[in-house]
Image (cartoon, rainbow, N blue to C red):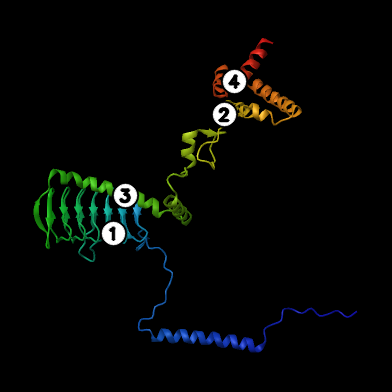
Amino acid sequence: PVLARRRGPRSPPMLTRVLVRALRGFSRSLDAAGRALDGAPYVEQLIPSTRVLKYRGKLPTIEASFVAPCATVCGDVVIGKGSSVWYGAVVRGDVNSITIGENSCIGDRSVVHVTGMGGEAPTRIGSRVSVGASCIVHGATLEDECMVGDGAKILDRSVVKKHAMVAPGAVLTSKTVPSGELWAGCPAVKVRDLTADEVASLSDAAMDTAELAHLHMEETSKTWEEVEADRIDLDDRTRRDPRYFQPQTHEAIAEQEGLVEGRPAPGRIFNNVLRYDEEAALRERVLEDVLELAEFDLTPEQAAQFSERDLALREDALDVRYEDAMNQLADMDPAMREEILAQAAPSVRARLQAALAESEAA
């Protein structure tokens, strides 16, 4: 027998391959021509997060509660517990060291740097210090519980003592701000003494910012799944009419309604908890049957329209319904029985009471 030769997948025709190569080369040439015409050619690249950077083998030591995703902490930097570095801020300890105490904050777009290259001046920031937005702290010392207003510049070898304040936009050049004083201007000079309430507010402001930083840390640490779930939840709460059932967590339901077989209630589709009250259900059912008995009463004019045979059949059926109602009433609590009989039509009530009395006598 002649064995057929197996054939693999057919290769594209020679003309197609030549055309593909030509188009590929043309696209590369077109891209190169575009870059040549651009005065400042730029190729976009994916750059990893630069939140925390090592410099010359020194990695920042951070115990802060919050460092914003777009902030940068670099080199020989130590940040204490509860402190925060906000959005766009830079803390760069490259040619000298930076120390930040506990519950201090570095505001948005602020820069904390040092002086080196022969003019050694590290930066020391104490605890509960508030540095506002867009500030520059360069080779300076900020003692505990002081405040630097937005846009202020604290330059080389300047010192801001405890319970002192530098006003927004001030420029402090190699001077010392004594405790309890407010300095402002360019260059900064003393304006007045701080009041007792203003001194007390310095620590309070730092602690308030520390609490806010914790909330920002929780939000910026969420995964994309958690962010999407929050978005859906917000959309639901915005659109849902307050008169409708409001969704609750399993923990809240368990606290309100207890546990089901040791677990929180898995949820429900109605606005109230589904509970079956057997006694109440029996009362409603018997009351409905008793009220319906009044519909079978006939006036003399209505009875005249039926034959004797039809009236007898109707009376037999009615006897069965009365007997069922009487049996149900007999099994009931006396108080509930009297409540139901009180709502029945007089003729129905009299007949049922007679049947119940006869049943009890028997």
Q: Between marks 4 and 3, how big is the CA–CA gap? A: 72 Å
Marks 1, 4: nearer the viewer: 4
Of labels 1 and 3, earlier in sequence is 1
Of labels 2 and 1, earlier in sequence is 1
Of labels 1 and 4, earlier in sequence is 1
Q: Which of 140 and 298 is in front in this view?
A: 298
Q: Quadrant of the C terminus?
A: top right
Residue annotated with mark 4 = 349
Q: What element carries label 1?
A: loop
Residue annotated with mark 3 = 212
Residue 244 appears in the rendering? yes
Q: What element carries label 3?
A: helix
Residue annotated with mark 2 = 277
On residue 108, the disc is 1
Q: Which of 39 and 118 is in front in this view?
A: 39
Amino acid marked by disc 4:
Arg
